[in-house]
Image (tube, rainbow, N blue to C red):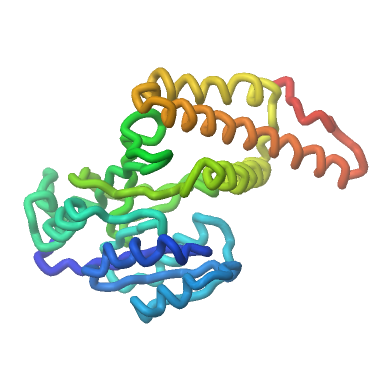
């Protein structure tokens, strides 16, 4: 990374007026701030964004991957940092990013020197149910968010696509603070939304719900988060998070089954309306 590498910060937004100011102000040091507003947004998010940057676009939502890809494409600089509106770049992390961008030692590792580094993973930590979560499925949560946009490709499915890079990927110290949910009710609302998006993506891929998906996957997810990843060390919040995550998995496959039944009805009732594959 050169001593003068500029950076663009990209954010996609919908109805985030309460959290957006803290998110954007935490990256005010960036050379460029690009914000794409979902055209379904009905609060003051656009006004808040325009007060902080001229690079604001209102755009129809075509899925999380499509929206983020478009936002990154609008960035002027090759180095891009993606931040969600419910995230805050902590002071230590911000300092570490700037140190890399100005030729600090973190940007010089790798067998081919600094030019080989194509991305950095940031450790995201969630604040939920009155405490910072330190175990389970929520933590540690390394996300590839800082990267050269000329070296990336988008992978995965909505609503949780991810970026792969061509080159060396390193980790940065510091914390990406995640204020995802205001309370448990907010978490359940988001589970409803994201499980529906995931079910649509599975259907688009031609996936079919199997009975074992409903029976086995939810308890397996609970066991992973609560026992294998030590979620129980977070006390009651750890149990609630593991149960809610399991419920998300259940809803995803239940909604896929529902979509399959609707497709059968539209086709005139041909096919297995139960949606429970034997495979």
Residue at image location 39% in from the left, 28% down from the top: 136
Residue at image location 56% in from the left, 68% down from the top: 41
- Farthest residue, direction right: 268
Residue 266, compared with residue 17, is above or below; it is above
Residue 68, compared with residue 215, is above or below; it is below
Whole-percent x, y for residue 157 in the image: 53, 46
Residue at image location 60% in from the left, 19% down from the top: 216
Quadrant in which the N terminus appears: bottom left
Q: Is residue 205 visible?
A: no
Q: Is residue 170 visible?
A: yes
Foreground residue among 18 and 221: 18
Q: Is residue 271 left or right of residue 86?
A: right
Residue 213, compared with residue 154, is above or below; it is above
Residue 186, compared with residue 147, is above or below; it is above
Foreground residue among 208 and 82: 82
Q: Is residue 210 left or right of residue 139?
A: right
Quadrant in which the C terminus appears: top right
Residue 18 location, quadrant: bottom left
Whole-percent x, y for residue 4 in the image: 13, 69
Residue at image location 35% in from the left, 58% down from the top: 82
Whole-percent x, y for residue 2 in the image: 12, 63
Foreground residue among 165 and 15: 15
- Farthest residue, direction front: 130
**Figure label count:** 0
Residue 20 location, quadrant: bottom left
Whole-percent x, y for residue 217 in the image: 57, 24
Q: Is residue 270 left or right of residue 217?
A: right
């Amino acid at each position: 990374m050169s001593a003068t590498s500029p950076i663009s910060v990209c954010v996609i937004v919908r109805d985030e007026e309460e959290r957006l100011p803290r998110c954007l102000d935490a990256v005010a040091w960036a050379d460029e701030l690009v914000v794409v507003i979902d055209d379904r947004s009905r609060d003051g998010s656009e006004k808040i964004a325009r007060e902080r940057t001229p690079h604001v676009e209102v755009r129809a939502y075509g899925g999380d991957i499509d929206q983020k890809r478009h936002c990154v494409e609008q960035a002027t600089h090759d180095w891009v940092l993606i931040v969600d509106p419910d995230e805050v770049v902590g002071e230590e992390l911000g300092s570490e990013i700037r140190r890399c961008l100005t030729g600090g030692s973190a940007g010089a590792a790798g067998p081919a020197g600094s030019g080989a580094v194509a991305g950095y993973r940031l450790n995201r930590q969630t604040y939920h149910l009155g405490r910072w979560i330190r175990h389970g499925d929520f933590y540690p949560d390394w996300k590839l968010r800082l990267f050269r946009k000329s070296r990336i490709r988008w992978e995965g499915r909505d609503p949780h696509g991810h970026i792969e890079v061509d080159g060396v990927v390193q980790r940065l110290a510091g914390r990406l603070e995640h204020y995802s949910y205001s309370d448990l009710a907010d978490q359940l609302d988001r589970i409803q939304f994201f499980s529906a998006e995931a079910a649509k993506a599975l259907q688009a891929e031609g996936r079919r719900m199997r009975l074992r998906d409903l029976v086995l996957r939810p308890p397996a997810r609970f066991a992973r988060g609560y026992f294998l990843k030590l979620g129980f060390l977070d006390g009651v919040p750890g149990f609630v998070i593991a149960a809610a995550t399991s419920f998300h998995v259940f809803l995803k496959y239940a909604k896929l089954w529902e979509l399959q039944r609707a497709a059968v009805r539209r086709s005139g009732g041909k096919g297995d309306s139960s949606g429970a594959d034997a495979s």
